[in-house]
Amino acid sequence: MKTIDLVVPCYNEEEGLEHFVLETNKVIDTIPDYSFRYILINDGSKDKTYLVMKKLAARFSNIKYISFSRNFGKEAAMYAGLQHCDADYVVVMDADLQHPPAVFPQMIEAMEQGYDCCATKRDEREGESFFRGFFSKLFFTLSNKMTSVKNPYGAMDYRMMTRQMVNSILELSEVQRFSKGIFSWVGFNTKWISFKTVDRQLGTTSWKFSSLLRYAIDGITCFSVTPLRFIAVMGAIIFFISLIYIIITLVQTLFLGVITPGYVTTMCAILFLGGLTEMSIGILGEYIGRIYMETKERPIYITKFSNFEDENNEEADGGSYEQSGK
Ligand code: UDP
Ligand code: MG
């Protein structure tokens, strides 16, 4: 019997986690030819997600969990899950049922047809604000143009992959992870399926506009040096324009004498070049920061508790534990 591991990052999901498992179990029961296992990752939740996880693991034998020592982010949680899976096929999905388990049969069918990956993209972005929709379109267009990563609009992390593809993903051990880019970067045959998105029913989304902006910047800088090239090209263009301007000014001065008025041009030049320099330094800084963080080679995550046999570090009291904040 083929096995499928479900990697599920969970952050503050105490309200919805049980519902998620029960709903997913309903779908799993309709697919008897495959054996499913959950790998739940508690990404340093500030609520009782960990306790809910433990209870679920005690109730269902196919639930494994890893609990982080603090919040490391969804990317780190996915990485931890992928590191721990050993099934034939691996699914990464959210715990809030926005990634419907109902498409499992469709995914399995694609995998059995020989695809290495069956990924999802959202069809309609109903309920999404105009603002968010606009920026996410802009992001997909920009990142497809600027990086080697090609994702269709609305591409999501939710996907089923072969073991071989997961192994390749794990080989990319960078600390600053951008999964959508990594999934695309490793290659392999991907079949895209789409479904209508649903609103999060329980709990709240942990994304703010600032974190989405951060995510977009990560998406581009992790996979491309185009911004660096852009500032170099811009510098060159401005250099040539200023050469022409210098020649014109010199000629004017030589033939017409010293022309004093020039407040506006001087101010424009100072402000424009100043702004441009600041922006260029900012872009450079973004990359230097990344180099700095990567050279530290820190672990991507730190496990505090887990019920994987080889990591026998479950805490003894088994009950009153509640993960605290920072
Ligand atoms: N998540 C996580 N760590 C975080 C933030 C989110 O593991 O720091 C998990 C969360 O529990 C959920 C998934 O990542 O299973 C997606 O999060 P969310 O639903 O908040 O994001 P959205 O659906 O809005 O992209
Ligand atoms: Mg969600």
Image (cartoon, helix red, strand yellow):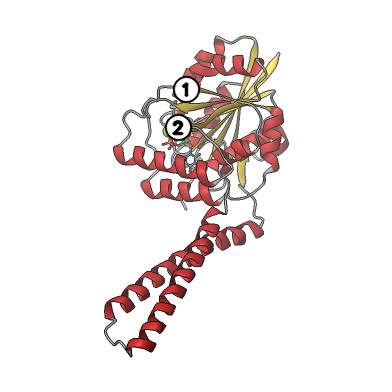
Q: Nearer the viewer, residue 102 or 17?
A: 102
Dot label at residue 2: none
- In which quadrant of this rendering is ligand 2 seen? top left
Some atom of ligand 1 lies within 8 Å of the CB belonging to the residue at label 2 = no
Q: Is residue 108 left or right of residue 215?
A: right
Q: Please, which residue is most extreme toward the front here?
A: 255
Compare residues 61 and 219 and report the one nearer the observer: 219
Q: x, y (%) of residue 165?
A: 68, 31
Give the vertical position of 29 relative to 61 (above or below). above
Q: Are marks 2 and 1 in contact (CB under 8 Å)?
A: yes
Residue visible at 42% across and 67% down in the picture: 276
| Number of marks in the rendered image | 2
| Quadrant assignment, res 2 | top right
Please name whichever residue, 39 or 108, is drawn nearer the observer in this view of the structure: 108
Q: According to the image, label 1 marks what residue? A: 194
- Say which residue appears at 37% left-offset and 43% top-offset: 135
* Place of residue 179 in the rendered image (x, y in percent of width and height, measured from the top left): 56, 40
User: What is the spatial separation of the Cα atoms under label 2 and label 1, in whole angstroms?
Assistant: 9 Å
Please tell me which residue is depicted at 28% across the width and 81% down the height of the picture: 263
Q: Position of residue 287 (x, y in %)?
A: 56, 59
The residue pinned by badge 2 equals 154
Q: Is residue 268 above or below residue 31?
A: below
Badge 1 marks a residue whose secondary structure is strand
First in sequence: mark 2 vs mark 1:
2
The quarter of the rendered structure image containing the N terminus is top right
Q: Amino acid at mark 2?
A: Gly
Q: Is residue 287 above or below residue 250?
A: above
Name the element at disc 2: loop
Q: Residue furthest bottom?
A: 257
Q: Residue at x 44, y 23 (%)?
A: 19
Identify the amino acid type marked 1. Answer: Ser
Q: Is residue 309 left or right of residue 81?
A: right
